[in-house]
Structure formats: structure tokens, C-alpha cells
Amino acid sequence: MTSEVLSTDEKARPEVVDSPRRVPLSRGLSTKLLLLTIVFVLLAEILIFLPWIASYRVSWLKERLGTAAAVSIVLLQGEANSLSHTAQNDVLMAIGAKAIAVRDGGVSRLLVVADMPPQVDEHIDIANVGLVNGMTGALETLFFGGNRMLRVFGPVGDSDKEFELIMPDRSLRNAMLRYSRNVAVVSLLISLFTAMLVYAAIDLIMIGPIRTMTRSILSFSEAPDDPGRIIRPGDRADEIGVAERELSQMQERLQKMLTEQKHLADLGLAVSKINHDMRNILASAQLMSDRLRQVKDPTVQSFAPKLLRALDRAVAYSEGVLAYGRAQEPAPSRRRLRLRQLVDDVHGLLDIEEGIEFINAVEHAFEVDADSDQLFRVLTNLCRNAVQAMAADKESAVVRRLAVSAERLGSVSRIVVTDTGPGLPPKARENLFAAFRGSARSGGTGLGLAIAYELIRAHGGTVELVESIGGRTVFAVTIPDQPVRLDQARGSLRRPA
């Protein structure tokens, strides 16, 4: 059985492509984080660079205009025309200008001129350069400058005169390029330094713990049955600490689940091996019991029915184990059932010893929408558990009663199984519907409740423990009716004549 299940699972399982166990450094989170930090810092430096370069351009022009103003004041005190042509060229060359003029009282006066250009490409009012205009002009000088002619004008200091300077932008562009290069080098150094600091901090706070969790996951996947492979969470209170604790709990649960699955697989293998021999033994026992029924001895006749019921219980238990070992129960074939008759059939199958009272409190007309065989198995398991629990108490004065009742709440049927047994121990209540862990008695397997839970869940219902104290244990089985399809309901209705 187990080998067939394994082979089926292997066929159904999609092909898994082996992934590398170790992530290369070039694709690791640390490298990506370092590169992204450098890129983001450089982007921030670029955004800062634009107002910086615009401010540098304005400062450079103000400095040149200030120098031209100083020369103009000296020339105004003397005679500008007294300067020779060579001296004028020396003055203009010193400040890199073509001409210097001054406006005083609305009168403009050309002080020094060497070679008046035919046209001016840009007029710059040094006192009214805005942020946007300054950045636009700086970008034009950087990318399109070198051969453009500028007219720079404006007041200088507290002077009431306005000075004017006509000059090419070649020297300005060269100065701006040197400034940009220096800013780029500094920005790159800042980005590298910042990236290293951010990397060190995040590696300590986040990447390191994530790397530890990754190694724990890989190590746990290699040997999930080894308790030493479970991660040991720290005492951090942030998201990483929560992830470590959840991973540790998940690995512990998975380890327990794998252990239980291994036990189930071993059980299935053992049952598959002994199933053939068990059938032969039970067949021989049934044949002998049939012959015993033909014996007229009253003593034999009194023990023969009990022997038959014992054999039936052995067969039912074996079938229950095999049914639970199957990958899936068949889908329920639901019909309208008379529940009282089904409960009577369950009563007839139970081996109820003397002193235990069975009460079928289901009304004669009560109907339930369920699979007959599956509901019979559910009620048999619940009632057998109750009978076995009460049979352990041999005191004659103790009331031992098992009652089955039912009620309907709208479209939901609720079946209640009540016994006066000793109640379920705490361990059984914690693992109530878990196979091999939810048994309430020594030597039990807990398969009965696990099977009942699975069958009722297939009906869309629930099995729950309502109450369990000394002297009263109540289980409730809730089964909703099947939903009615609208097209079928319309077809079943007859139109009035």
C-alpha cells in the first residue's frame, strides 16, 4: 500500500529544478544593497548639484563684475580715453572681458572696449537671477557653452551705479567643468562612505540574521528529523525576532508532523503486510463460528453471537485502519435518511455489556441529509468510544447511560451523543481529532474520532466536543442540508392550473 502511494505521489509531483545552495556574492543581498545605496546617494547628489552649479555660476559672474566695477571706478576718476589701446587690452584681458561700461543717472558710458562682438547670446541681470533661471543657464553653459557671448549687468555693493560687462563664456565654462569634476569626485567618495556605513548597519541589523535564517532553513531541509537543526531564536523584539521565533515554531511543528507521518507510513506498511494473512485468519474464524451456530448446545448458542460480534469488530477495526490509511475518503453520496432507524442499526452492532443503558431519543419522523454508510461509521465510532469509556467503571451504583438525540435548526441537522462516562482527560481533549494522539484510553489509537471528523467535514459539517466532565460527555455532529440548485428547483415546481 505504501509503495503504491509513494509511486503515485512521485508521478503527480512536478519536476523540481535544483537551485544553488549558496548564493554567489555578485547576486547576494549585501552586494545589491551596496550598489543601490551608491546609486541612490549619487542621484541625491545630482539633485543637489543643480542648485550648487547655478550658485557657482552666479558667484563667478559676480566676482568678474566686481572686478570690472573696481576698474571702472579707477577709470572714472581719471580719463578713460587717456589709456592706450594696449593698456585697454591688458585691462580687459585681466578680467576676460570684451568691453566694460557703466550706467550712471540714466546715462551709459563705454569705458573700455577691445573688440565689440556683433551680437550677445545671453543677457544676465546679476541682481535678479532666480533658482530656475540660474539652473537653466548653468546647464546651457555646461552643455552648449564655449563660444557664446554674455552680457552681465547689475549694481555692485552699495554703489548707485550699474556696471556692465560683455565677455565670452569660455572661461566660465572651464571653471564650471573643474567645479563639476571636483563635486563628482567628492560625491562618489561620499556615496561610497555612506554605502559602507549603511551596509555595515543593515548587515548587522537585518542581512546577518536573514543569512542565519537562510542557513538554518537549508540545514533543516537536509535533516528535518534532527532537533539540532532547528533555529534558536534570539530575544529581539522587532520583525526579525518575530520571524526567527515563527521559523523555530514552524520547524518544530514540521518535525513533529514528519515524525507522525513516518509513523503513519510505517503503520500502513505493516498493515499491508499482515492484511493478507489477517483475512485468511478471519475467514477461517467466521467459518468456524458459522458451524458453531449449528450446534444445539445452549451454552454454545449463548456464546456464538458474542463470537460473531467480536469477529465483526475485528474486521471493522482492520477496515477502519485501512480506510484511514487511504489518501482520501470517497465523496459522500447523500440521501434523505431516517435517523432513528440508522441509530437502531448502530445499537445492534455495539457490544454493550449489562448495566449500560442505550437510549435512542431520535424522533421517528426525523430525517437527515447524509451518506448512509459514512454517517453510520461516524455514529458507530462515537457510540463505541462512549461504551468503552463507561465499561471501565465497574461500580454498580454508577449510572451508565448512552443517549443519541437530534434536532433541526433551519436547514442544519444536529445530532447529539451523550454519555455518563468519566469524561475525557486533558491530553485527549488537546489532540481530540488527531490520529494516534487523541485516544482517551490506554492502548487506543484515536482513529475513531479522526475518521469521524474527516467524514463529517466532507459533508460540510463539524464534529465538536460540547462538554466533558466527570459524569457527562457530549459530542455534537452538525450536518447542513445540500444546497438546492436554482434550475433544479424551478424544474421541480409545477405551474398552477
Image: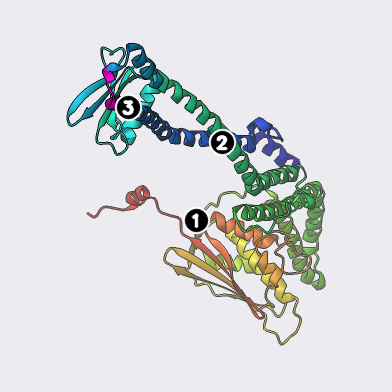
Residue that label 2 marks: 191
Give the quarter of the image for residue 386: bottom right
Coloration mode: rainbow
Secondary element at image label 3: helix
Residue beneath the point at 73% across and 75% down: 391
Q: Amino acid at mark 3?
A: Val
What element does badge 1 sit on? strand
Q: Which residues are magenta?
A: 71-81
Q: Nearer the viewer, mark 2 or mark 1?
A: 2
Residue named by callout 1? 335
Q: Is residue 67 left or right of residue 476?
A: left
Which quadrant of the structure image shows residue 124? Answer: top left
Marks 1, 3: nearer the viewer: 3
Question: Which of the labelled discs sits on residue 74, or is there none?
Answer: 3
Q: Residue at x 32, y 27 (%)?
A: 74
What separation in Å lies between label 3 and label 2 (alpha carbons)?
A: 48 Å
The amino acid type of the residue labelled 1 equals Arg
Mark 1 or mark 3: whose residue is earlier in sequence? 3
Residue at the location (66% across, 69% down)? 429
